[in-house]
Amino acid sequence: MGMPHATIRTLALRAQLVGLLLCTACPGNDSGDLVSQGARIYKQNCIACHNIDPMLDGATGPAVAGSSLELIEARVMRAQYPPGYVPKKPSAFMVPLPFLQKEIPALAAYLGSLPAQPPK
Ligand code: HEC
């Protein structure tokens, strides 16, 4: 005895559908929230030097809340600054992290969602 094949197939299909629906919220999925993805990328790659709260200065890296896409792109890809930008710190400690290229829009969405810090 046992379940007829058709029923088993229906159940399997249903399980697959549920999996698909749940996965729209999977990290890294395009339909996921860009700001929360950026927050995750920031915590994974930036807080060795920058503060876990981007609005505060970190161990060596300055506050980065409010950073523009252009600034983040220049820093992350080349450890440089956009033309004419006045850096918060004169040092050159930050290393480029070009493997994060495709995460730059998410980082910009996250950091841009926070108010920029007025210079002290
Ligand atoms: C190795 C330590 C280190 C890491 C890792 C690091 N940074 Fe930095 N960052 C710095 C330091 C230090 C500065 C100040 C300039 C310098 O010394 O390079 C800086 C400067 C910046 C600035 C410019 C701030 C300003 O307005 O002058 C931005 C934006 C920035 N970092 C973003 C990031 C992001 C985003 C990440 C992660 C993807 C990251 N940094 C990872 C150390 C780091």
Image (cartoon, rainbow, N blue to C red):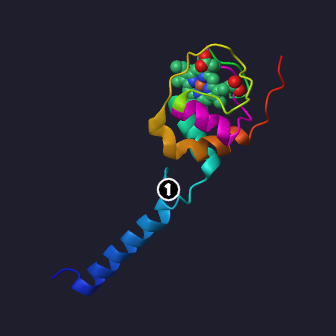
Is 92 in the magenta?
Answer: no
Compared to residue 13, the image places residue 42 above or below, namely above
The kind of residue tagged 1 is Asn
Extent of the magenta region: 60-77
The answer to whether one can see residue 83 in this image is yes
Rendered-image quadrant of the C terminus: top right
> Residue 111 location, x and y as percent?
68, 38
> Residue 49 location, x and y as percent?
57, 19
The answer to whether one can see residue 52 in this image is no
- Check disc 1 and report the residue beneath it: 29
Quadrant hosting residue 74: top right
Compared to residue 105, the image places residue 88 above or below, namely above
Rendered-image quadrant of the N terminus: bottom left
Left or right of 110? Residue 101 is left
Quadrant hosting residue 84: top right
Q: Residue at x 49, y 67 (%)?
A: 21
Q: Nearer the viewer, residue 11 or 116?
A: 116
Q: Residue at x 79, y 35 (%)?
A: 115
Q: Residue furthest front?
A: 83
Left or right of 39? Residue 83 is right
Q: Residue at x 57, y 45 (%)?
A: 37
Q: Nearer the viewer, residue 62 or 1?
A: 62
Is 63 in the magenta?
Answer: yes
> Residue 107 location, x and y as percent?
61, 40
> Residue 8 location, x and y as percent?
27, 79
